[in-house]
Image (cartoon, rainbow, N blue to C red):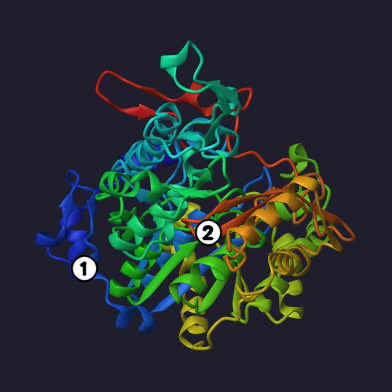
Amino acid sequence: MTDIQIANQAKLKDIREIAGQLGVTEENLQLYGRYKAKLPLSLIDQDKVKQNRLVLVSAISPTPAGEGKTTVSIGLTQGLNRIGKQATAVLREPSLGPVFGIKGGATGGGYAQVLPMEDINLHFTGDFAAIEKAHNLLAALIDNNLQNKKHGLGIDPRTVTWKRVMDMNDRALRNVVIGLGGTTMGVPRETGFDITAASEIMAILCLAEDLADLKRRLGNIFVGFTFDRKPIYARDLHANGAMAALMKDAIRPNLVQTLEGNPAIIHGGPFANIAQGTNTVIATRMGLSLSDFVITEAGFGFDLGAEKFFDIKCVSAGLSPNAVVLVATIRALKYHGGVALADLNEPNPEAVKGGLENLEKHLENIRQFNVPAVVAINRFTQDTDAEVEVIQQKCKALGVDAIVTEVWAEGGAGAEELAAKVAEVAEGNDTPFTPLYDWKQPVEEKVEAVAKKIYGASAIDYTTQARRDLRKIERLELSHLPVCIAKTQKSLSDNPKLLGRPKDFVVTVREIEIAAGAEFLIPITGDIMRMPGLPSKPAAEQIDIDEEGNISGLF
């Protein structure tokens, strides 16, 4: 059966019953029908956050063959509950862009899914819409201020970098001109659209501690300069109060369930190649307040989402994971070993061996943070025992356990062995993780630490624009912020064509965006785009709904 057929056959529990598993009463729920609810921030208990176990699920460098990081996260949560551990999955919300584009949904697969699958993959509880509205409200206020010569702030429109956003892949909106049509239509200027997942508002939501902190961060958004070079922030436009009001429900985490009836908290959804790629601090703390184990994930490979999870989210929020699960598939390793996509189903232990250098580099990166790792081999039906053995022997030589998981086919039962090992490792580790760099270091040193230590670059090159951006950051006294590097997910380098473990490459920083509200800097490398485009055959063409309201084609 397809993922959506499996999801449709599942008998969902009432969300009040799921909340009861966490000790949460109906009075504390903001219900969205029978199967979704929002949780109040008052349930967060910092003492329990520090006591309970946090497990991060990451992966090797992504390939078109797929790795199944979210599926393993959900399956592991189900496996832990099956062996008697109280575990909650804490994940990101899907963006409509990938759902209707090439990647599909982000609710897991097979018998390791979060439900209700259609709702989560589509509008869910409206969090993305609230982020979009708050972002575009600031854009409207900026353009209104430019138009208002009498009461305006004198903003130089050439310095405004704040674009608009929408939760859709639409390459035609990357670069636009607004304000045409006459003097009453606004001030003409070049701008564009980003996808909502790339919005600074999304990043702010995911790092905010509470509503007051959200409002403070929204006020700190850098807008541009006046004609006399004075910096302007969202608070100068008196925008942050209204923006925070639009986010009053979006700040509350969403409670749903796995296919086996375990709690799952889903909140926030930044991409890891253009933002920090992790769910909200609030959701992670909520999970740790209500359950003994939290299984969370970070987008794309360990070099992207996981590095940012440690160096930005964990440092900012005072979190420290007890273990990392690194997901790998035989298909992906063969791809990194040079096998064409069309030939990945053919048994090829030698190609698996050739791709192991990518896995080895990610394990080296995990060790740099001083956190123990377990490798999860996400097994497909065509994988052979000989190919599995290649991975396990390599991991044994590296001192890491590599455990086969079959969660897509078997759900939590396919992750019991992995769950037992992860529980053992996590319960045995109370050592705080080691950040890769100190936020107080100069910006260039922080970029170098990530590019050289995590990516394996030999050098970093800055364009003229990036050098100008460094001077602007210095002038705004924002050099103390961490770096959230925007980079292709397809390679450890900034060149998507370099598979495996590239060496002796140079990372080029084209420009550096300022996210003063989110409190990080965004060095942009390679040809990375913040508004993706649709593929030649979008997934949207396969999605349909019948007269009875049954949706098909979601995956």
Nearer the observer, 491 or 460:
460
Q: Is residue 483 above or below residue 106?
A: below
Disc 2 marks a residue whose amino acid type is: Glu
The correct choice, above or below, for 513 with respect to 421 in the image is above
Determine whether, in the image, residue 45 is placed left or right of residue 92: left
Q: Secondary structure at mark 2?
A: loop
Name which quarter of the figure residue 255 lies in.
bottom left
- On screen, residue 120 versus residue 143, left or right, reads left
Q: Name the residue rendered at 53%, 49% in the picture.
A: 230
Q: Residue 20: image x %, image y %?
A: 17, 65
Percent coordinates x, y for residue 24 in the rendering: 17, 67
| Gap in angstroms between the C-alphas marked 1 and 2 | 37 Å
For residue 312, above or below residue 148 = below
Task: Tell which circle, 1 or 2, labels the residue nearer the N-terminal end.
Answer: 1
List x then y, in percent, for residue 550: 30, 28
Q: Secondary structure at mark 1?
A: helix
Q: For mark 2, what is the residue?
A: 406
Q: Residue at x 63, y 62 (%)?
A: 302
The residue under the point 68% across, 51% down is 469
- Image x and y of residue 232, in percent: 48, 48
Q: Amino acid at mark 1?
A: Ser
How would you rate the neighbour count of disc 2 (Cα within 10 Å): few for under 14, some for 14-19, many for 20 or more? many
Query: On the image, numbered disc 1 is attached to which residue?
Result: 42
